[in-house]
Image (spheres, helix red, strand yellow):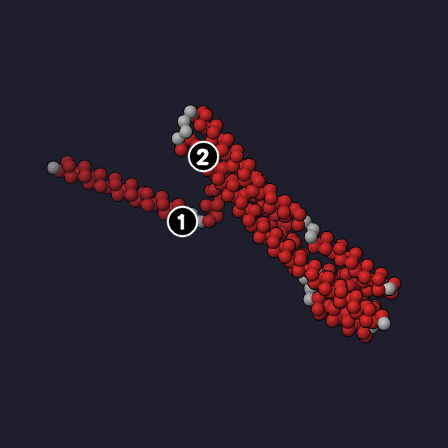
Amino acid sequence: MKKVVNILTVTGFMFFGAVQSTFAQEAAEQSRTFHQELKLRFIEGGPGFMGIVLVALILGLAIAIERIIYLNMATTNTKKLVASVDDALSSGGVEAAKEVCRNSKGPVASIFYQGLDRADDGIDSAEKAIVSYGGVQMGLLEKNISWLSLFIALAPMLGFMGTVIGMIGAFDAIAVANDISPAVVAGGIKVALLTTVFGLVVAIILQIFYNYIISKVDSIVNNMEDASISLVDLLVKYKK
């Protein structure tokens, strides 16, 4: 009887020890931070294609941040600028208006300066200069955006390529083991799914930045066009 009690006691300790170990392992998995979990999934997905997709994310974010900074610096209060140019034209003429444009930042001020610089040649010449230089400024606003769209398209394509390679690896494992058990194909399928998810996540992040940049460019271009019309009207007004 005493021996049975001892066996039950030892068995109970082993059971509770196993339960405690299981809970400790689950707690350790749950206590992993987001950074640790992301790093683990990145390693499990394979450094090959995951690294290429990561490079696409880094380059895309670099272009997006540079464009956002440039566009925010290019955003100006066009109504205030038009009012300042109007006051300068009425008080000091074209040279005073050009000085206002020199002291102002942004593409609208640059366009105004080019138009005012050719105001003495006539309204038509000034209008052509405004239109031509407006195209130049629009090109500067849209600079490198095509590269951002390339990375948006490239990231999921690389993820899908990793998916195909992971599935090929799974079928190779089946051929080697001559078995289709889940344990044989789990590794390849896991790599396939992780590369796909990572590629899609990168594309979604860059797409958000891309849409914001495009909307910002459209807003600045609309302000440029409205301000250019206002400048031509001012030149016609003070040339009479």
> What residue is rendered at 79% in x and 69% in y?
234
Quadrant of the image occupied by residue 119 = bottom right
Figure check: 41 above or below 67: above
Is 129 placed above or below 3 here? below
Judging depth in this view, the residue of 135 and 201 nearest the camera is 135
- In the picture, the quarter occupied by the C terminus is bottom right
Query: To which residue does mark 2 refer?
Result: 187
Residue that mark 1 sits on: 31
Category of crowding for the residue at label 2, using alpha-carbon neighbours closer than 10 angstroms: few (below 14), some (14–19), many (at least 20)? some
Residue shown at 48% from the left, 28% from the top? 172
Image quarter of the N terminus: top left
Q: Is residue 197 left or right of residue 216?
A: left
Question: Which callout, 2 or 1, points at the residue further toward the start of the chain?
Answer: 1
Residue at x-position 39% and y-position 30%: 181
Query: Does residue 55 show up?
Result: no
Image coordinates of residue 124 in percent, x first then y, are 84, 62
* Residue drawn 50% across the image and 31% down it: 168
- Which label belongs to residue 64? none
> In 3D space, how far apart are the residues under numbered discs 2 and 1 (Cα atoms)?
24 Å
Amino acid at the residue labelled 2: Gly
Say which amino acid is labelled 1.
Ser
Residue 24 placement (x, y as % from top left): 34, 45
Q: Bin the neighbour count of mark 1 within 10 Å (Cα to Cα): few under 14, some 14-19, many 20 and up.
A: few
